[in-house]
Amino acid sequence: MTIQALVDFTTTRFKEEAYSIYRELRREEGFHRFTTGDGANAWLVTRYNEALDVMRDKRFIKNPTVILSKEEIVQKIPIFENELITNQMVNLDPPDHTRLRHYIQKDFTPKAIEDLRGMVQEVTDELIADMKNNDEIEFITDFAFQLPIIVIGTLLGVPKEDKEQFRRWTNAILESDNSEDVAEDVGLVFTQLTDYLTELIDDKRSHPSQDLISSLIHTDSEEEPLSLKELLSMIFLLILAGHETTVNLIGNGMLALFQHPDQFEELKQTEQLLPNAIEEMLRYYSPVELTTNRFAAEDMIYKGQELSKGDLVLVSLASANRDESQFENGDQFDIKRSHNPHMAFGFGIHFCVGAPLARLEAEVAFKTLFKEFPDIQLRGAFDDLKWRPTYLMRGLEKLPVFV
């Protein structure tokens, strides 16, 4: 069977069979040609070393506007029609990427993130208190989904009285499946959230406080201030990408533990294993299936393949993180794995700036869950669980549990 028949990233079938598909593709080669649903030439990278090479190579760029017309870009990647997407730093190259990352980096240093531990613990405790009112819990909706969106809202400086509306807006966008029948409703929510954030930015300009939006607005005097579009794009990136990664880390991690009860029991008894276990969760069920888009900046011969200028290149982090050449018994879950240079958060200049926050949230979440719900278990059968048919991410639709 050709890769063209195998790769349809947004189907439930692909999500269910992805790891066996990746294993077969890695055996053949690390660089595979296919055609997108819109007819554009594209390449899938499945091996660890090739993934590193592509993420290092400056000939693979993030910003297609320097090599393609607007019409060609929208044909290849329809979502690029939205300026809040095209202006995000994950879709830009140096020096634009470097400039934007500089503004956000200071708020995600190890010390800055550690200072958030108390707030993350408070949010976790409140969610778990609500969960205690029910014996049967839908873990994704009731906990994994809620924790990061409340944390990011607090971090951004969303007023307490607006947090419920903020959560409704962001939940609607994050839970949408991009189908035509919901596109109009999601578009309305997108507009409402944009208007809300614009007003919030205006308020923070006049009344700054100790929050991330104020920090992004009020820069050092010698720095060029961010434009409104840049501010909005940065906030949307933090909400969408950062939130989704953490939801999947916590949800997928809990699934892996349910699937490996002996390791789950040992982890509950040995708290010191938790940081190592979280890294294995990130590797085993990578929250981000594929990196965001890269494009060939020129015609080239790469890894023996003939690429044309403008070809789309996707790196499968999920496949690279199971590569047998890098990870012994890569398809096995092992919370004691000692050699684990996974790339769940990417690599190089586009390494996820929010990785320390995701790790902190996961650490606090699992530590508290194990303490408050030592007998937590799956409600139902593993075969009934479904992966969400989303393009870049890997996450469960639902994870029902008994607590």
Image: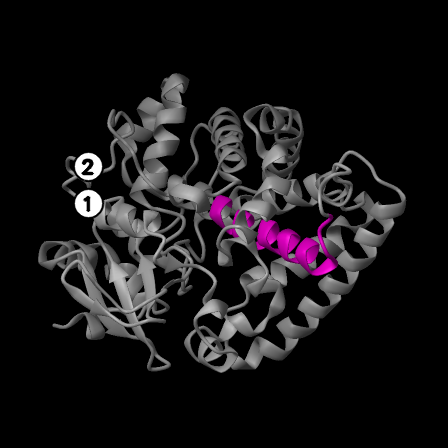
Label 2's element? Answer: loop
Q: Position of residue 272 (x, y in %)?
A: 39, 17
294 within the magenta span: no
Secondary structure mostly seen in the magenta stretch: helix
| Residue type pointed to by label 2 | Phe
Identified at 69% across, 39% down, the residue is: 155
Q: Position of residue 322 (x, y in %)?
A: 22, 45
Do we see residue 258 in this rendering? no
Q: In the rendered image, which quarter is residue 266 located in?
A: top left
Residue 74 got which mark? Answer: none
Q: Nearer the viewer, residue 252 or 400?
A: 252
Identified at 47% across, 31% down, the residue is: 366
Identified at 35% across, 46% down, the residue is: 286
> Does residue 325 appear left or right of residue 127 in this picture?
left
Q: Position of residue 200 (x, y in %)?
A: 81, 52
242 within the magenta span: yes
Q: Nearer the viewer, residue 319 or 394?
A: 319
| Residue type pointed to by label 1 | Asp
Residue 327 got which mark? Answer: 2
Residue 323 got which mark? Answer: 1
Q: Which quadrant of the rendered structure holds the N terminus?
A: bottom left
Residue 80 position (above or below residue 314): below
Q: Which residues are magenta?
A: 225-246
Q: Position of residue 56 (x, y in %)?
A: 33, 47
Mark 1 near mark 2, Cβ–Cβ under 8 Å? yes
Label 1's element? Answer: loop
Residue 70 position (above or below residue 50): below
